[in-house]
Image (cartoon, rainbow, N blue to C red):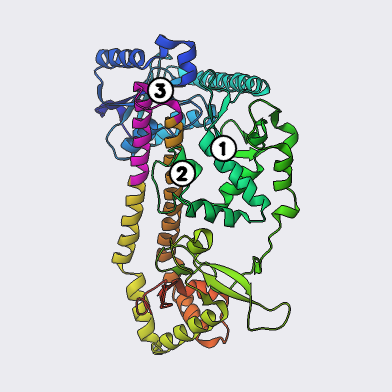
Amino acid sequence: MYDLTEVEYIAGAYIRLSKEDEKGYEESVSVTNQRNIINEYAKKNNIKIVEYYIDDGYSGSDFERPGFKRLINDIECGLINCVITKDTSRLGREFIETGNYMFKYFPEHNVRYIAILENFDTFSPNGVEDIIPFKTVINDMYLKDTSRKIKSTRHNLMKQGLFVGSSVPYGYKRSETDNRMFEIDEYAAGVVRNIFNLKLSGMSNGMIARQLTNEGILPPDVYKNKNFKKGYTANLWKTATVKRILANEVYIGNMIQGMYERVSLKSKKKKLLPRSKWIISKNTHEAIIDEELFKRANSKQNNLVKDDVRFRKYDYLLKGLVVCADCGRTMLVRRCKSASEKTKDSYRAIYCCRTYANYRNNVCSMHYFREDKLNQLVIDTIKEHLIKYANESKMLDQYDKTMSSSNLLQKYQFQLDEKEKKLVDIDKAISELYKDKVRGIISSEEFVSIKKDFERDKKSIEDEIYDLKVTIKKSNGNFMKDETRRKVINDFLQVKQPSKQLINDLVKKITIDENKNIKIYFNFQVDGEI
């Protein structure tokens, strides 16, 4: 049994202050006050504090706090074995997750937890632990009550036609006399008017986006300096941006807010509410577009696609595997009318570069390749290549050699470690960003905007981490079974028309470059690539 009396405690002091706390109790829960209480306690009880983990401005309902995550990471690494807080509400106000850390996670990791004001200490149980669950429920009730009050206040402001969002719609700026009201930004408003006029002239949203890009007009996020990390498509107008502007009633003087709400207090996920629940205030600011013009631009007739390109959802044999060798994006399939065919409904599927299709503007090239010809070419080439390994023992030896290679798994694991380090770096960057806001280096609007960009990057990296974990699991598992590998390879060699699943079992990706050179990459190494 683990003997607590023989442990030397290396403690981490956790301090949290939310905006709601600042409005209420101020000094009693300030960072300085919490630090002083913890230091005094540690000194009296001969506990060594090696690190302070501070989350300033973070709600107790959300455990995705940079300081708290760093604390958990240091516990996992064995750097600390004791956590001290001023009280349990500093650890968290959401009773299920808070209780999980106090009564499950900390004990399982042999971590001593101390909540000073509640006299709670896992080192010396004194009956207080029986009361703590009720206190965490009270904390949770306080959190819900605070959330309701904030929501009610925001809704009252919305009903008055006052803007409570963080990002002002393109075409407007905050009023110099009241930052909850809009004034027209003449330059951006001119672009908005141009978009509506182009729509009425018969141009599609995509055509409008390309024309704006060709004219060198910066898209909304770049114009408002919201793109903290600019990618190669940052200066390109997107079809979705044009569509959003055309549908936004803010341009006829109406303020529409409260369109989304969280699915629950404990989740960041939001859902779109029915229009009947939106808070709509009319004529709250000067209109950029006449209401009649707005209706004409959004009429059903104006939103019809009038070209020969057809977008349909077909489960093409190689769809999802074909990648542009130059820009790295998955190629899409379009069905276009064949000029050589005379029948009315003659359409031909082609693969083309997604970047080119979305933006044109010389960002990439089309990389055109007929879908039926690519299917046959890939199938014939893979079969021809695998037949060279007709000697089954040689083929399986090569398969085993690659799939059991520690180098391959080490490569995946290294990539996974790097991605997880990036997540930690992003959390640290968000923490530093908040400090810059507190010091007045950046404004609240800049903080919200930049933080959104970081969170977008974070979500992308988390998706990549998930894919890598699946790949590692797959490499360690199913593909190593004799019966599985034999079946996949033999099935492919024997069937005349392989299924999509069979192709996916064998092929990792297929790349096409500008000169239509094709490379096929396997999920295991037969010959690396073709």
Q: Position of residue 391 (x, y in %)?
A: 39, 89
Of mark 2 and mark 1, the one earlier in the sequence is 1
**For mark 2, what is the residue?**
456
Name the mark nearer the viewer: 3 or 2.
2
Residue 124 badge: none
153 shown above or below 338: above
Q: Would you say the residues marked 2 and 1 are in contact, meaning their CB atoms lie under 8 Å apart?
A: no
- Badge 1 local density, few (<14 within 10 Å), some, or many (20+)? some
189 shown above or below 351: above
Which amino acid type is marked by label 3? Answer: Arg
Report helix, strand or loop for mark 2.
Answer: helix
What is the span of residues highlighted in magenta in the rendered image?
422-445
**For mark 1, what is the residue?**
189
> How far separated are the C-alphas under marks 1 and 3?
43 Å
Q: At 36% across and 50% down in the image, what residue appears? A: 419
Residue placed most toward the observer, 156 or 129: 156
Name the mark nearer the viewer: 2 or 1.
1
Residue 16 badge: 3
Q: Is residue 427 magenta?
A: yes
Q: At 40% across and 36% down in the image, what residue appears? A: 108
> How far separated are the C-alphas under marks 2 and 1?
28 Å
